[in-house]
Amino acid sequence: MKRRNFISKTITGTTGIIVLPMIVPSSVFGKNAPSNRIHIGQIGCGRIARGHDMFETFKYDDAMLVACCDVDSKRVREGKELLEKWYSEKTGKRKYKKIKVYTDYQEMLQDSNIDAVIISTPDHWHARNAIDAALAGKDIYLQKPASLTVKEGRQLSDVIRKTGRILQMGSQQRSVNPWPQFKRACELVRNGRIGKVKEIYIGLPGDPSGDEELEMSVPANLNYVVWLGSTPFIYYTEKRVHPLEGYDRPGWLRCEQFGAGMITGWGTHHIDTAHWAMGTESTGPVEIEASASFPESGLWDVHGDFKVTAKYSNGVIMHISGEYPNGVKFIGTEGWIFVARSDSAVTTSDPVSQDQVPKALDASSVNILESEIGKDEIHLQHSEEQHRDWLDSIKSRKQPIAPAETGHRSCSACLVIHIAMKLGRKLFWDPQIERFTNDNEANAMLSRPQRKPYGTDEVE
């Protein structure tokens, strides 16, 4: 029985005396008393978990990280140690030893004391992890991108809708902390401050190729077969997975077996911003043309330099390339707005840098930036911080700022662009039925063969 429900239940003691429910006002223990906290399990204890997801959740008093899981026993142990160190300092208890550890996330999902999970695993595991969590009755914070393929993303969104679970995508450009400029830019565009949007330019780099890497013995601490998940079996080498020591950028990000590269890794952020500004969060492009360079050899085989033109049914043309400043530029009939994170080109450990970092928010006229949004105009959903918004949604059962379908659509737009990169010809996409028009080869790439028993198709 969950502790938060304990005082509301009728308990029969050994003496046979019935004790009536005791209603304790929140003022006695406070709204963040242990019985009112959201108990959270962390799935995946790597770079993004340690540097972002766990810390951004730990800081809230109404959330309690109670367990962590990873197929790497060394990483899960270090995740436990990190959480216990944080809680020791926060609670003043020198020997805080209350974090459970799991190497099998399915076992974690069976823990009835866990209300929700944060999923910070590699891309190829996202959809299956989240589907299983939803079916186990857990609410979910899911790192982007939503899925490895369009089919997986549709399966995930449908399961979330049917189960009624709360799923928040890690599309943190929607939250005002730490980047308030994205919401501001999107509201200005939605309210016509640059007139009718005609074009959007998204700056997004490619990844470099790498050397051939020899087969290595699988470390004793890593369950490599499970780490590969639904993807084909291939020999282990450190740069295909993650560093044996430390938490630098993992090599799997540059392997197409596990993701599509920068087009989904960062494209989901910027395309999501474009969708938010256009009001196209439940659809996608209808025409796509793309070219890209792909390594001819080496371990790392995701796309390098690329160029994309995508047309939406509203007539807007989206251009994506590393030739443009990293960020999103909206061009309308009456001016333009540019928005970016501005603190780094991509992330501090990525190999791509820029000589000049663009302004976080810029426009063709200062009057655009100083314009006030009236009370009768469009005000986009407000979120202080992505994890905070998720916790609030768990409590209210209202949709978070980046729900499953929104995350799927920003991801699927990237994935159909990636298919166009691979085929090198113009593709016509129907976002309603999520199929290409008259292109069987392209449609065959909407899914991938899945290695049993790990794929989303294995879920009943």
Image (cartoon, rainbow, N blue to C red):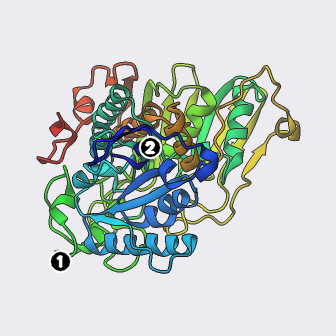
- Residue 282 showing in the rendered view: yes
| Residue annotated with mark 1 | 220
Label 2, label 1: how many angstroms apart (C-alpha)? 45 Å
Where's the C terminus, which quadrant?
top left
Residue 6: % across, % down: 40, 45
What residue appears at the point 32 percent right and 69 percent down from the top-left corner?
76
Residue 246: % across, % down: 40, 78
Quick check: 429 above or below 123?
Answer: above
- Residue 205 showing in the rendered view: no
The kind of secondary structure element at disc 1 is: loop
| Numbered badge on residue 355 | none
User: Which picture quadrant has residue 377?
Assistant: top right
Residue 202: % across, % down: 58, 44
| Residue annotated with mark 2 | 7
Question: Tags 2 and 1 in contact by the CB under 8 Å rule?
Answer: no
What residue appears at the point 55 percent right and 68 percent down from the top-left corner?
348
What residue appears at the point 70 percent right and 23 percent down from the top-left corner?
196
Label 2 environment density (alpha carbons within 10 Å; few <14, some 14–19, many ≥20) = some
Quick check: 427 above or below 12?
Answer: above
Name the amino acid, label 2.
Answer: Ile
